[in-house]
Image (tube, grey):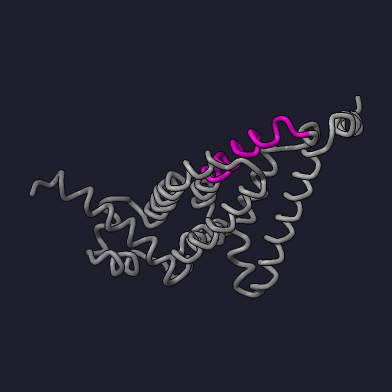
Amino acid sequence: MTEGTRMPATRDKLIDGALAAIRAHGIAGVSARTIAAAAGVNQALVFYHFGSVDDLLTEACRSATAARVAVYRERFADVRSLRELLDLGRALHEQERAEGNVAVLAQMLAGAQTDQRLAEPTASALRLWTAEIETVLRRLLRDSPLAPVADPAGLARAISAAFVGLELFEGVDNAGARDAFDALERLAVLVEVVDDLGPLARAALRAKLRPRT
């Protein structure tokens, strides 16, 4: 086996090891030693391949999030209503939480509070989710009477923030987290009711919601 074929395999092991270390120890317990132990390699390889633990964490967060977003891209494209989007969000959250992926983002966000080197890569990872959600929201709200006051970009950021925040919320108040999802679902039902209004009611609502100059 050549050096060129060994390096990607080692890098992949280190990335997987970094994710495993975050899940097992939290961001405060991650080190070259815990990452190397999870990866089954010598800890010197962390610095050989990535230069620093922070650079390895950055790459692990980015690559793992990109891979997970790709898994759901077709399902996002198939969403036809806000209720379907929330149903997908609930399923996605449960799956990603069970696999520990939401915990990784939450821990990276926690680490970014005291380490600015983690802030931008963590934000970039969240933007991958936000971009997918914003695309769906723009499509769903395009012809809605609520379009004049809708802010798909802001809503997408709020949903992305909730996606991570609910991971922390569930740890202390599982019922409260379920209530949060239920409240969002009721909001989606309200939007569906608005979209089903007759033409006169829709026109009146648009006029009422039209931004004032």
- Pick the quarter of the image with the C terminus: top right
Q: Position of residue 58 (x, y in %)?
A: 43, 50
Percent position (x, y) of residue 134? 61, 39
Q: In the displayed structure, does residue 157 sit left or right of residue 110?
A: right
Q: Is residue 111 visible?
A: yes
Observer-nearest of 169 and 62: 169
Residue drawn at (79%, 45%) of the image: 193
- Taking depth in this image into account, of 16 and 132 the one nearest to the observer is 132
| Residue closest to the eye, 174 or 191 | 191
The x and y percentages for residue 166 are: 62, 63
Outermost top residue:
213
Q: Is residue 118 magenta?
A: no
Measured along the vertical axis of the image, is residue 77 above or below residue 27?
above
Question: Residue placed at 64% from the left, 73% from the top?
Answer: 174
Position of 20 relative to 148 (above/below):
below
User: Which residues lie in the magenta part?
Assistant: 127-144
**Residue 63 vertical placement versus 109 (above, below):** above
- At 47% from the left and 69% from the top, the residue drawn is 26
Our reading of the magenta stretch's main secondary structure is helix
In this view, the residue farthest toward the left is 1
Q: Residue at x 49, y 59 (%)?
A: 96
The number of numbered badges drawn on the structure is 0
Point out residue 39 in the picture as x, y percentages from the top left corner: 28, 64
- In this view, the residue farthest toward the front is 198
* Whether residue 211 can be seen here: no
Q: Nearer the viewer, residue 198 or 31?
A: 198
Q: Residue furthest bottom?
A: 172
Any magenta on residue 129? yes
